[in-house]
Image (tube, rainbow, N blue to C red):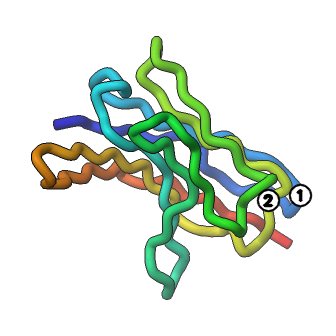
Amino acid sequence: QVQLVESGGGLVQAGGSLRLSCAASRSIFSINTMGWYRQAPGKQRELVAQFTSGGNRNYVDSVKGRFTISRDSAKNTVYLQMNSLKPEDTAVYYCNAKFVRYGDITAYWGQGTQVTVSS
């Protein structure tokens, strides 16, 4: 099990920046994948960025070049630096952790943090 606590959301003007943090209750290297999802009103939750089990970074096309996922193992924290924000980035952002054991996937979610980008 793991508890995930997000912080860093808020209201920002288009073109601005925010940094989201996700603090995990255990070593992030004990987790197979960690990343960020978002859900806008009336839309499905989508993957934004994640660390794979091999340590690679994946991004959804719409944020490539603007968002950066990083981690600090000493703090058991994963970050999402969001630059050049657009109104379409407005959503609730969720931290996600997945454990894979013998082919079974168990996912954990944070409580979500609201990001609002005004035009």
| Dot 1 crowding, Cα within 10 Å, few <14, some 14–19, many 20+ | some
Relative horizontal placement of residue 107, taking residue 111 as reference (left or right) = left
- Dot 1 falls on a residue whose secondary structure is loop
Whether residue 28 is situated above or below residue 106 in the rendered picture: above
Q: How many marks?
A: 2
Q: Nearer the viewer, residue 4 or 48?
A: 48
Whether residue 45 is situated above or below residue 28 in the rendered picture: below
Residue 32 lies, in percent from the top left, at: 32, 39
Whether residue 41 is situated above or below residue 81 in the rendered picture: below
Residue 20 lies, in percent from the top left, at: 59, 42
Give the residue at mark 2.
85
Residue 33 lies, in percent from the top left, at: 38, 43
Q: Residue at x 32, y 21 (%)?
A: 27
Residue 66 lies, in percent from the top left, at: 79, 53
Q: Are marks 2 and 1 in contact (CB under 8 Å)?
A: yes
Question: Tag 1: residue type?
Answer: Gly
Q: Residue at x 58, y 44 (%)?
A: 57
C-alpha span from label 2 to label 1: 5 Å
| Dot 2 crowding, Cα within 10 Å, few <14, some 14–19, many 20+ | many
Hey, which residue is sitting farthest bottom in the picture? 42
Question: Tag 2: residue type?
Answer: Leu
